[in-house]
Amino acid sequence: MEITREEAFNLLKEYVDSKSLLKHCLAVEASMRGYAEKFGEDIEVWSSCGLLHDIDFEKYPDDHPFKGAEILKEKGYPEDFVMAVKGHADYTNTPRETQMAKTLYAVDELSSFVIACVLVRPNKFEGLKVKSVKKKLKDKAFAKAVDRDQIKNSAQELGIELTEHIQTVIDALVKREKELKEQGLSLIE
């Protein structure tokens, strides 16, 4: 099966109506694209994995991500792709054995956290620094649903130092926001 971002996005829209969940999936996609470039991986595949990681979250919240893995398997997505989606939730006890799986796990929470940081800034993405994100990570009252330990541990699992990890995600989100705006979409509007 040839995996394309366009097909993945169309599939996502069949299952997701929530604007906030769609934006989250687009943010995770952006970070996966950034890492695909960094690691020399297939951007279409990694982009699609980021888009589809929460495909089941809205319609099947009690079966997430098991139902999503099932949907993707039925659609013909390869085993490593399906396992990456299944493995982005700790409670599935699915080992993250591929670079794609480790990356998806590492960018899921952090992508949302960086977007939360951007939303409270007057200049949004402009001038966003790692230092600002790290400062917000220490503020337990800010975006308190975000698991700070998961962010730190997942960067270690990926083998990337936290500062570099945050910078990679910021850069990917900034770049993708420009591209998405040209398509009439946005991560923050």
Image (cartoon, rainbow, N blue to C red):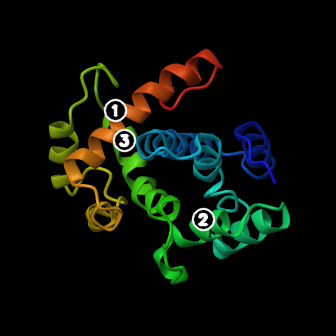
Vertical placement of residue 5 versus 53, above or below: above
> For the residues marked 1 and 2, what is the alpha-carbon distance in whole angstroms?
26 Å
Vertical placement of residue 61 versus 139, above or below: below
Residue at the spot 55% in from the left edge and 21% down from the top edge: 179
Residue at the spot 44% in from the left edge and 45% down from the top edge: 35
Which residue is tagged 1? 118
The tag earlier along the polypeptide, 1 or 3, is 1
Residue 65: x, y in percent? 63, 70
> For the residues marked 3 and 2, what is the alpha-carbon distance in whole angstroms?
19 Å
Residue at the spot 35% in from the left edge and 58% down from the top edge: 146
Residue 11: x, y in percent? 79, 48
Q: Which residue of the protein is positioned furthest toward the top in this rendering?
A: 182
Q: Amino acid at mark 2?
A: Val
Other residues around mark 3 within 10 Å, as few (<14) / some (14–19) / many (≥20): many
SS class, disc 3: helix
Residue 50: x, y in percent? 57, 50
Q: Is residue 17 left or right of residue 188?
A: right
The tag earlier along the polypeptide, 3 or 2, is 2
SS class, disc 2: helix
Q: Amino acid at mark 1?
A: Val
User: Label for residue 169?
Assistant: 3
Vertical placement of residue 78 versus 129, above or below: below
Other residues around mark 1 within 10 Å, as few (<14) / some (14–19) / many (≥20): many
> For the residues marked 1 and 3, what is the alpha-carbon distance in whole angstroms?
12 Å
Residue in the foreground of this view, choosing between 49 and 26: 49
Which residue is tagged 2? 85
Q: Are marks 1 and 3 in contact (CB under 8 Å)?
A: no
Q: Amino acid at mark 3?
A: Val
Instruction: Tell me the quarter of the picture where residue 114 sits.
Output: top left
The tag earlier along the polypeptide, 1 or 2, is 2
